[in-house]
Image (cartoon, rainbow, N blue to C red):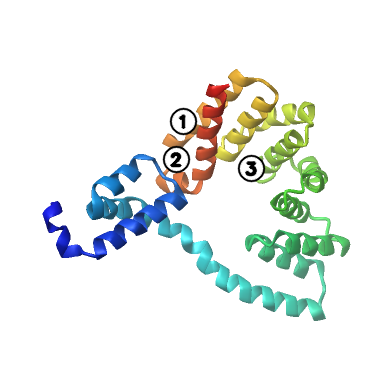
Amino acid sequence: MFGLSHLFYPWGFVVQIFAIVHFVRRRPENYWFYVIFFLGWLGAAVYIVAEVIPDLGLLRGVFQGFGRRSRIQKVETDILDNPSPANYEELGELYKDQGQYEKARDAFNRAITGRSDSIYTFYSRAQSSLGMNDLAAAIPDLERVVAGDRKFDYYRAAGLLANAYAQTGQLERADPVFAEVTQISTTPETLYNYASFLKTANRRDESREWARKLLAKKRTLPRYMQRRERPWFRKGKALLKELASA
């Protein structure tokens, strides 16, 4: 097998380097590093087929971003003639999807000032504040959303509120909200945030239990969702290691 490597020089090294770069960025299962490193170009090719090609589906957002930027320019122009709450809401959503959270929040502020009382707008503004790590600003908006509809966004709004309470030291307020949310929602985000809250509350045995539930969740998800939720599983592993070493 390796006697044929001269036929692929230098492309075999290129394939191997590409696979290693992807591995470092995406951090799949650790055994893939040994497959790439010790099996050379063949191992790298297997990795690309198994991990890189399926990841291409996650790049849709990159291509959508090009159209989104042109839409932003169009809406910004429309606002000059019609600064309506609806136009500001759309602009805010476009900015939020682009990760421009400060601009997004400003647009949602203008929509709300223009008498938009939709809980969707308050929720989007809360998400923008969370993107800026401004938890204090996000909490009132999330409280308004949850008060209007406790099931909003399949309980994600309530889960984000509980996590914001926890991260701002309001553990007594976080506890009952988490208790309610985790009865219904088992998303990796919610499971990790609850396990992290339990660690902060010095309920380490419960934290370990919920971190294990998070990692067990990975086995029940389809492959494309495992890839999308990979950062939460990685955080869950790190949390378990931290709990084990304490």
Residue 185 in sight in this render: no
Whether tag 1 and tag 3 are in contact, CB under 8 A, the answer is: no
On the image, the x and y values in percent for residue 203 come to 65, 20
Verify CB contact (< 8 Å) between mark 3 and mark 2: no
Which percent across, then down, holds residue 16?
A: 30, 56
Report if the CB atoms under discs 2 and 1 are less than 8 Å apart.
no
Question: What amino acid is labelled 1 in the image?
Answer: Ala
First-in-chain label (3 vs 2): 3
Q: Quadrant of the C terminus?
A: top right
Q: Is residue 188 left or right of residue 162?
A: left
Q: Amino acid at mark 2?
A: Leu
Q: Is residue 111 above or below residue 136?
A: below
- Which comes sooner in the sequence, label 1 or label 3? 3
Residue 176 located left or right of residue 230: right
Q: Which amino acid is tagged 3?
A: Tyr
Mark 1 Cα-neighbour bin, 10 Å: few <14, some 14–19, many ≥20:
few
Of labels 1 and 3, the one closer to you: 1
Q: Estimate the spatial distance between the alpha carbons at disc 2 and disc 1, rounded to whole Å.
A: 10 Å
Quarter of the rendering containing residue 172: top right
**Residue at 80% from the left image edge and 47% from the top image edge:** 141
The residue shown at (73%, 62%) is 104
Residue under circle 3? Answer: 154
Which structural element holds mark 1?
A: helix
- What x and y, as percent, mark residue 122? 78, 53
Which residue position is annotated with label 1? 216
Q: Which residue is mark 2?
A: 221
The residue at 74%/76% (across/down) is: 76
